[in-house]
Image: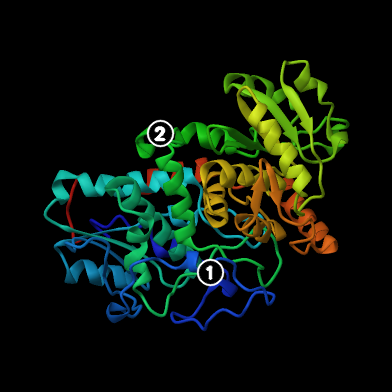
Amino acid sequence: MAGSTSPGFADSWQQDDDEIVQLFPAPASPTKALAPLYAEEDVVKGVDPSKLVKWVAGEKYPMVEDGWFYYTTHIDDAHTEEEINTYPADFLFSSYLPDTYRSFCSDWGPCSISVILAFCKEVHEKWEHPMLQSRALVYYSAPACQKVFTNTALMLGAYMMLHHSYTPDDALLPFAQISPSPFLPFRDATFINPPTFDLHAVCCLRGLYRAMRLGWLGTQPVQDFDIEEYERLDDPAVLNMNQVSPKFIAFLGPQDKRTAEEWDEYMHEPHEYVPVFQARNVSLIIRLNDASTYDKRVFTDAGFDFLDLEFQDCTTPSPEIVKTFLDAVDGARGVVAVHCLAGLGRTGTLIGCHMMLHEGFTAKEVMGYLRLMRPGSVIGPQQQFLCELQQAGWNGNFPLIGSGKVAVDLEESAAMAKQVANAVRQGRRRSSISVSNRTLARVDSVSGGGGGG
C-alpha cells in the first residue's frame, strides 16, 4: 500500500479465537460478586451525554478540537486501501506497538512505559513532519480485538498528555464519548476468571500524570527517559528489574545457584545485581520472600543495608509489616531495592503503600502507574487491599486497617503464586526491546509523503 504506514493486518492483528469479540459486546458480568471500589475513579470526567457517538468501523473520531488528528478502525487491508483512495488528503498510519504486550497469565496490558514512549515518538514524527502539515493525520487499528484497541486508546491518550499537555481525562475524552464503550478494563497477572478487579485506562494515565508532575520521568519524559536502558534491565534474561520511581527499584528475587540442572537463563544470582545497585545509589535491599533463596551476605558484604520482611506470596501485608517497611524506607540513605519471588505482587503492594502515603497516589493510580513501569505489578487480593488502604487512617507509618479487612483465600493465593512463578520461570516477563526494534524497522518512513496514507 503506497503511502500507508500500515503494519499489515495479516501480520499484525491475528488473534486467538477467544479474543475475537462482537463490535458491540454485551456488558461484562460482575466479577466474583465484588462491588467495585472507588468506582467513580473509573469514569472519565467531562463526558457530555448529549454528544455520545456510536462505535462504527471506519468512522473517524477526532482526537483534537480542530479536527485534523483522528482515530479510526479498519476491518482489513482492503478497507484501508479504500480509505486511502477515498480520502487522498488524509495521511493514514498505524503501529505494531499496541500489540506487543506479553502476558504472564490472562493479563494483556497496559503496555510498558518504554513501549508507550516509543509509540509517542512514532506519532510525534508524523505530527511534526513538514510534508504532513497540510494533511489530516488518521491513526487506524483493527476492530476485531478489544484488547489491542484498548491499549491503542491508552497510548494515544498518553501521547496527547505527554506531548500536548492534556490532562488524563481530556486525553481520553474522545474515547469516553463513544457509547456503548468498546474498550475493556485491564486485569491482574493471574488466570483467575472472572477477574476480581477492573483497572481502567484513565487510572493508568492519572498515575502516570501524577508521576510526571513529581518529576519522576524527567522534565520531558519522551526525550529524557532512557528507553534502551529500561528495556535492557527489564529483559528477563538480563536482570528483570525496573526503577519504578527515584526511590524504588523492583526486581526479580535472586537465587543461589545450587545445581546446573535447576538453573536457566531467567534466574539470577545476587552478585549480578551488586554493580548495578551500586551505580544507582541503592543503600537498602528488602527481601519479601523466603530467606533460604540466597545468602544475604552477598549484599551486606558489598555495603548494602538489608531487611528480611517475608509474608506469603499473593497475599496482603499486615499493618505491622507495612509500618516496618515504611520505617525502613524512611531511614534509607539512598534508593531502596525491593523484591519478592517475582518482584511483582508483594513488591508492588508495599511500594504502592509508600506512594499513597507520601506522594498522594490513589490506589488505582498506584496500580496503573506501577503496571506501566513494571508490568504485572499488584496481584489478586492486593488490589482490594490498596483500595481499602486508601480509606484508612494513619498513625505515622502504621495504617489503621484491620488485619482481616480484606478477605484472603490462602488456597487461591497459593494457586495464583504458582501461576506467576511458572510464567516467570518460562521467561514470560514482558520485555519489549526486540519487539520494538523490529517494529520501528518495519514502519515505513513518511519522508516521501506520497499516496493517500
Quadrant of the image containing the N terminus: bottom left
Q: Residue at x 32, y 67 (%)?
A: 174
Quadrant of the image containing the C terminus: bottom left
Q: How many marks?
A: 2
Relative to 239, is 429 above or below? below
Which amino acid type corresponds to the residue marked 2 in the rendered image? Gly
- Determine whether the residue tagged by mark 2 lies in a helix, strand or loop: loop
Return the residue nearer the eye: 269 or 289. Answer: 289
Q: Residue at x 74, y 62 (%)?
A: 406
On screen, residue 180 versus residue 342, left or right, reads left
Q: Visible in this render: residue 252?
A: no
The residue under label 2 is 218
The residue under label 1 is 39
On screen, residue 413 versus residue 367, left or right, reads right
Return the residue nearer the eye: 296 or 423. Answer: 296
Image spot of residue 117 (x, y percent): 41, 44
State how far apart marks 1 and 2 are (Cα): 31 Å
- Determine whether the residue tagged by mark 1 lies in a helix, strand or loop: helix
Q: Quadrant of residue 244?
A: top right
Image spot of residue 170 (x, y percent): 32, 60
Return the residue nearer the eye: 280 or 330. Answer: 330
Q: Visible in this render: residue 71?
A: yes
Return the residue nearer the eye: 326 or 159. Answer: 326
Q: Residue at x 58, y 19 (%)?
A: 279
Instruction: Between label 1 and label 2, give the one nearer the viewer.
Output: 1
Q: Quadrant of residue 52?
A: bottom left
- Mark 1 or mark 2, earlier in chain: 1
Relative to 270, is 129 above or below? below
Mark 1 surroundings: few (<14), some (14-19) or many (≥20) residues within 10 A = few
Which amino acid type corresponds to the residue marked 1 in the rendered image? Ala
Are the residues at dot 1 and dot 2 in contact (C-beta closer than 8 Å)? no
